[in-house]
Amino acid sequence: MHSNHYDIIIVGQGVCGTVLSSALILQGQKVLVIDDGSNKAASKIASGVINPVTGRRIVKTWQIDTVMPSAVRIYQELEKKLGTRIIKQCNIINFHASEQMQKAFEDRIAEDSTYLSRQPLPNTIAAAFEAPFGHTVIDPCWLIHLENLLHDWRQYLIEKNALLQDVFDFKKLDNKADQIIYDKYTANKIVFCEGAKGEDNPYFKQLPFAPNKGEALLVKIAGLDNSYIYKKAVSIVPWKDAVFWVGSNYEWNNNNDDPSLAFKEKTTAALNEWLQLPYQVVDHIAAVRPANIQRRPFVGMHPTFKNMGIFNGMGTKGCSLAPYFAEQMTEHILHQTPIDNEATIDRFHILA
């Protein structure tokens, strides 16, 4: 077979493209990943947090009992394969914002205490925050070191001659009945893991994408314990050394990925009201997330162009959802096994 022929071309090397290419390679597939290395990709500025609960009532996130164990296993396998730190347990200390929120947490723990506890805080942490309404610990939570994951997997692909560092150009794509042709490369199938760019994909643009902008501050906080994530009006997440990721927001109907002064002012005001330690803002980052109206992934092969697939739409839950569904997508490609009813793109008849 010609050296430029691949089993599968994957477009995009964010979290989705990384874990899907890893799953396919693990199953013996010859993969080519096409990615331009943009620093504005949502995966490169995400916090990397896997939080099993959500919302004001702290209910379990969708399918968390299934997807979180898969995510932990897969990230640990990648950590071993790449020889770099990728995942660590990093529980969330959730500070109640009001007496009403405190009562809501108490009611929730009485109803179902899964992932929730009343662990006492170390004195150094208690002194670092203004917290008149107490706290709840969310346990276990996990933190993915996305910088290491994305960089080191990219280096792995380069070493395997499995990366084309370029902007994907649909004008170079020719979809034949029996194969994919892209420039000088051919493949049996192509899967798009483009993130927010998926909204403009001519084969999948009918899917109900609803991109939203997210921002975060990178803040140096000397003396704050980096073995926890802290959450109140904003989240404070260990980034590296004494720098923490602080965010985020959800700005809908805005595909502008420039940092905004309004976010910076609102976030620093929240820190000033809550954090008792001195801090210094060292950077302000922003990107557009590949969210969608249903808040469920887009996974599967196109019903008409059957050698074209999509693996996208994870929104803010990419770190938790992508590993599990990457394995499901891999099995679907190789053995035609079904994809979860709430994740498959077959639920959208507009593609047919």
Image: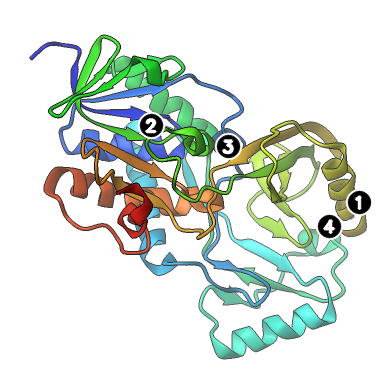
The local secondary structure at tag 4 comes to helix
For residue 27, say whether it is visible: yes
Whole-angstrom CA distance, mark 4 to mark 1, is 16 Å
User: Which residue is identified by label 4?
Assistant: 128
Q: What residue type is labelled 3?
A: Ala
Judged by depth in the image, the label closer to the viewer, 2 or 1, is 1
Looking at the image, residue 211 lies above or below residue 52: above
Of labels 4 and 3, earlier in sequence is 3
Q: Position of residue 193 (x, y in %)?
A: 40, 36
User: Which residue is identified by label 2?
Assistant: 83
Of labels 3 and 1, earlier in sequence is 3
Judged by depth in the image, the label closer to the viewer, 4 or 1, is 1
Quadrant of residue 339 within the rendered picture: bottom left
In screen coordinates, is 229 left or right of 154? right
The residue at 80%/31% (across/down) is: 282
Of labels 2 and 1, earlier in sequence is 2
Of labels 4 and 2, earlier in sequence is 2
The crowding category of the residue bearing disc 4, from other C-alpha atoms within 10 Å (few below 14, some 14 to 19, many at least 20), is: some
Quadrant of residue 173 within the rendered picture: top left
The residue at 48%/48% (across/down) is: 318
The local secondary structure at tag 1 comes to helix
- The disc at residue 269 is 1
In screen coordinates, is 224 left or right of 11? right
Q: Where is residue 121 in the image (x, y as percent from the top left)?
A: 72, 68
Q: Do the residues labelled 3 and 1 touch (CB within 8 Å)?
A: no
- The disc at residue 42 is 3
Whole-angstrom CA distance, mark 4 to mark 3, is 30 Å
